[in-house]
Every structure is written in C-alpha cells, then in structure tokens.
Amino acid sequence: MYNLHDNFAEVNVENSLEVQVGQLLHERGLKLVLAESCTGGLLGSRITDVPGSSEYFVGGVVAYAYEAKAGLLNVSWDTLNSNGAVSRETVLEMARGVRQAMPANIAVSVSGIAGPGGGTPEKPVGTTWIGLVSEDGEWAQLFQFSSDRERNKVAAVDAALQILLDYLRVKKS
C-alpha cells in the first residue's frame, strides 16, 4: 500500500537555500524574477515558501514549450532551432526576457531534460542549464544530474538557488 507520508521530509527551514537567498534579497532591497522550463514552477514554489517573499519576489514564467519560450520570454526562434531549449544561449535569453517582462534586479532561468525520455547522446537526461542575468552581468552554468525526473527537478532547483546565493554573497550591495 502506498503511504503518502513517505514522500515528505523534514526541512531545516531556517538555513534552507531559499531562506538565505530571501534574507540577502530583502536586506539589499533587490527584486527577483524567474523563468522556468523543466522545473515547472518548483523554483518559484520554493521561493514563495518563505514568509515575506512578496517583498523581493516579483514573479515567474513557466515556459515549457518552444512557443512559450518565444512568445512569453522573447527567446528567438533562431536560438531555439540552432541550440535547442537546453542550452546556454536559451537560458540567457529566457532570463533577459523575463527581466524585460517584469522589471527586476535579478533574473534566474532553468531549462533541462528531467527525464525519463527526451535525452540524446549530446544532451542526455539530466542535462540542465541555469542562467542568471542582472544589472552587472550574465552567467550560465551547465549541470548533469543523474537521477529520476522528480530528483532531477529538485536538484535543478537546489542548483539554481545555490547559484543565486553565491551571486548575492559576492555582489556588493
């Protein structure tokens, strides 16, 4: 018999990545926007799990299909057709696009292949790009996760939060 409670875990909320990110965004008066694909809103959910997140979180876009990436985030069809949805170029255009749609200091984007299907030899299941665009630059990082769909999505969100936290720690107010 399936036990619903087996899927829940205790989380140390005080030190969670989303709490640490929220504290720094709040202290510095910075605004955050998100553009998500493979994580399907999970990153936004984690950000909004923190009470008071409306002070620094403007919003997010879940753009799963190419049409959504192009139509909502202004990702160019040339980029999508040349590089695919899971690429450095695409996540940077996603982040630029969401930051244009909802003005904020920082935009984070995620696009990947969560699995179990969709992988190729060049981009196997678990391949994930995370982008960050701010007033002072643009960065993108490639990750290769190797688990099932749910764990790959959680790993992508954790990686995105860690990238954001690292950025905030080195950014001068």
Image (spheres, rainbow, N blue to C red):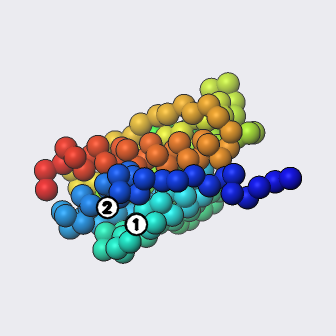
The residue depicted at 40 percent of the width and 66 percent of the height is: 50
Amino acid at circle 1? Val
Res. 50 mark? 1
- Compare residues 3 and 122 and report the one nearer the observer: 3
Q: CA distance from mark 1 to mark 2?
A: 8 Å
Q: Position of residue 92 (x, y in %)?
A: 41, 48
Res 71 seen here: yes
In the image, is 81 to the left or to the right of 101?
right
Local packing at callout 2 (Cα closer than 10 Å; few below 14, some 14-19, many 20+) is many
- Compare residues 47 and 104 and report the one nearer the observer: 47
Q: In the rendered image, which residue does mark 2 sit on? A: 22
Secondary structure beneath label 1:
loop
Question: Dots 1 and 2: beta carbons under 8 Å?
Answer: yes
Q: Position of residue 101 (x, y in %)?
A: 41, 69
- Compare residues 123 and 40 and report the one nearer the observer: 40
In the image, is 3 to the left or to the right of 80?
right
Q: Residue furthest left?
A: 172
Secondary structure beneath label 2:
helix
Q: Is residue 104 placed above or below 86 in the rendered structure?
A: below
The residue depicted at 69 percent of the width and 57 percent of the height is: 5
In the image, is 148 to the left or to the right of 132?
right
